[in-house]
Amino acid sequence: MKCVAIKGIKEFEIKELQEPSVDHENVIIDVKKCGICGSDIHYWVAGEPLGLVMGHEFSGVVKDPGSRSDLKIGDRVTGLPISPCGNCDACLSGNPQYCASTWQQAVGLSLSNPGALTKQTKVRPDMIMKLPDTVNDCEGAMVEPTAVGLHAIHLADIKVGAKVLVIGGGIIGLVSAMFAKMEGASYVALSETNRKRGEKAVRLGVADEWFDAKDTKMVETLLQKTNGGFDVVIECCGTSPAVGTALMTVKPGKTVVLVGVSLGTVTIPTIVGVMKELKILGAIGYTKEEFQTCITLMAEKKIDVLKFVDDIVGLEEVQKAYERLTSGTDDAVKILVDPNK
Ligand SMILES: NC(=O)c1ccc[n+]([C@@H]2O[C@H](COP(=O)([O-])OP(=O)(O)OC[C@H]3O[C@@H](n4cnc5c(N)ncnc54)[C@H](O)[C@@H]3O)[C@@H](O)[C@H]2O)c1
Ligand SMILES: [Zn+2]
Ligand SMILES: [Zn+2]
């Protein structure tokens, strides 16, 4: 079967991949939709690991149910791409995101488990979740990034009436902003370097206002606007300027949630964190419960994530889709891949 694999810096190749074999344990799915994630973009930009087949945000139809006796061929599913050990304290306490094994064999994020940028993929039986009829294939592929935002918001512990700043208007920033409003934030601001993405966040109703991160006076403006800072800042970008802005725009004693990741070292003014006695929290992934919550919220039409989907492309168009997502001038935020297109 055809797949999209990393060939070099900002370069993919279409090549042949062996179909996953039935092992009576793992679930094999025919991929329906697969999302392109900001984390995938980091790997593409770095050009490694060479040969990696990405795609950890997926929906599909069961081809082989493996050891899942409750599943049958044709069932519609999504899944957590992670590989927690299941036995450590973290796993036993319902926090697979703390498990040391969680990302080691992750689907679409490790060489050992090719992801969904192809026609079929293999997922651990305990990670597969059924999709109700009211959640379509596009929504199914959106569960994973939505759960990342939900996890960040749970950690942020937003109080009704709080003022929240989200830094970065990619999909993680947009879903975080959406959940911040649902938690009762009275004002949600978003900062972006890409004007089109900033305007889009406001147009889609997840942010009240957007601010241009290229404006050297932005921090000052935000501090004036909020009378001394935000109650919560959710950093969904990962670069030094973005993390620095987070520390500078949050109110003393309040919370910064770091969601953005960087493959390199990020330099931040720690003195600001010290002087303001900030709570700086990291947020990684999600719990199984949060993943399931996102499916339920979609099924009950409590959240609309389809408004974030800009395009659906075939495997041959993946390279172009990545270029579009990284142009810095396009308003596209989420592009899904349909390997059968
Ligand atoms: N912690 C987790 O579990 C987790 C999960 C998924 C993604 N991520 C990370 O979260 C980040 C966001 O993911 P995404 O899919 O939304 O990515 P994305 O690349 O689509 O979005 C990042 C956005 O930040 C904007 N930006 C860049 N510099 C900025 C600055 N200085 N100030 C404000 N905005 C700026 C970019 O224009 C872009 O729109 C990425 O680093 C990704 O790797 C973390
Ligand atoms: Zn993702
Ligand atoms: Zn574990």
Image (cartoon, rainbow, N blue to C red):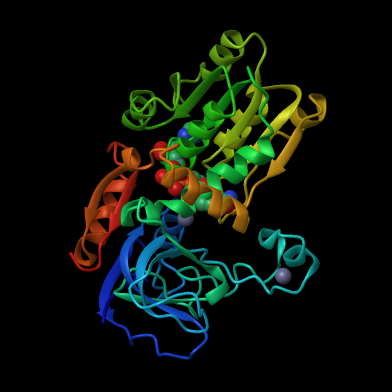
Q: Is residue 319 above or below residue 122?
A: above
- Which residue is at the front of the view, 335 or 181? 181
Residue 17: tell me if it is visible: yes
Which quadrant of the rendered structure holds the N terminus? bottom left
| Rendering coords of residue 57 (x, y %) | 42, 59
Residue 171 as seen in the image, left or right of residue 148: left
Q: Name the residue at 72% across, 66% down.
A: 91
Tell me which residue sits at (26%, 53%) in the image: 321
**Residue 124: percent from the left, percent from the top?**
53, 76
Q: Quadrant of residue 93?
A: bottom right
Residue in the picture at 56% in, 67% down? 82
Q: Position of residue 3 (x, y in %)?
A: 29, 75
Above-or-below relation of 259 to 130: above
- For image coordinates 61% across by 38% down, the residue present is 153
Q: Which one is in front, 5 or 296?
A: 296
Q: Is residue 322 visible?
A: no
- Residue placed most toward the observer, 247 or 201: 201
Q: How many marks?
A: 0
125 above or below 176? below
Quarter the C terminus occupies: bottom left
239 horizontally vs 277: left or right: left
